[in-house]
Image (spheres, grey):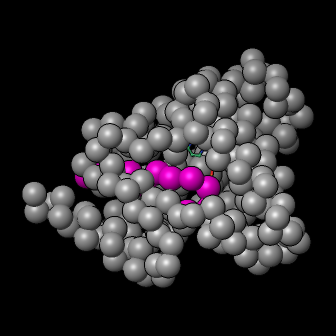
Amino acid sequence: MIITIDGPAGAGKSSAARALAVRLGFRFLDTGAMYRAVTFAAIQAGIRLTDAAAFESLARDIDLEVTDDQVLLDGHEVTDVIRTFDITCATRYAADHPGVRARLVELQRQAVESQDMVTEGRDQGTVVFPTAEVKVFLTASEQVRAKRRHQDLLARGENLSIEEVLEKQQARDYRDTHRKVGRLVPAADAIELLTDGMSPGEVVDRLQEIVQAQRNS
Ligand code: DC
């Protein structure tokens, strides 16, 4: 069974998808981590992110392994270093690049193989796994998402104002919903879940109910 959870930045997809996978005994795939890791790899290699040909060739050459709780780039753990604010902002070049996207979509499909999986991102239910059994579009209001991101960044020791986080989030939302390939849009058969006012536990409970209802149908 494949369960896709798509939605905008800061909607709490990663933690909800991860917790759902644990409850169901499924594997978990954080596809945003792949866009982050390929961006990190390009910066490390000194490649200009606007150099489309070099960026695509790097995306095809790197060895990227994303497990339930680790991201390995050419065998080295990069799980935490890909989560800085700078990398978050720079990921747009990877996300907007059709060739890089095509490579990451290939890797995402390979990662699933024949395993039960909860996969999380922007285009999982629309592009990558259009025949997934359960599709959820998880979202929250702009203010709730920005507050969540801001708290995450403060916890990581990155001191940004909430206004700055909100401004960057608005720019990212715009790009996510307007890119030519893999843009953020709910799949026609996705169930939309607005998480404002819900605790993380309530979100996972609701997701589990959605999966159960699908299994019973
Ligand atoms: O979910 P996240 O913040 O870790 O995502 C990082 C970036 O990758 C963000 O700019 C959106 C992009 N992304 C994407 O385009 N498609 C996906 N399936 C996952 C993430």
Task: Pick the residue in front: 184 or 34.
Answer: 184
Q: Position of residue 124 (x, y in %)?
A: 43, 43
Q: Residue at x 32, y 40 (%)?
A: 188
Can residue 129 be seen here? The reply is: no
User: Is residue 216 part of the magenta span, yes or no?
Assistant: no
Residues drawn in magenta: 1-11
Q: Position of residue 199 (x, y in %)?
A: 48, 82
Outermost top residue = 53
Relative side of 162 to 127, left or right: right
Instruction: Tell me the quarter of the picture where residue 40 sits.
Output: top right
Task: Pick the residue in front: 155 or 81.
Answer: 155
Q: Is residue 10 above or below residue 22?
A: above
Q: Position of residue 184 (x, y in %)?
A: 52, 41
Q: Position of residue 11 (x, y in %)?
A: 55, 63
Relative side of 33 to 136, left or right: right
Name the quadrant of the C terminus.
Answer: bottom left
Q: Residue at x 33, y 49 (%)?
A: 190
Q: Residue at x 47, y 70 (%)?
A: 195
User: Is residue 5 part of the magenta span, yes or no?
Assistant: yes
Q: Is residue 97 above or below residue 15?
A: above
Relative side of 134 to 6, left or right: left
Can residue 101 be seen here? The reply is: yes
Q: Is residue 133 above or below residue 210?
A: above
Total numbered badges shown on the rendered structure: 0
Q: Residue at x 40, y 80 (%)?
A: 202
Instruction: Tell me the quarter of the picture where residue 19 sits.
Output: bottom left
Relative side of 25 to 141, left or right: left
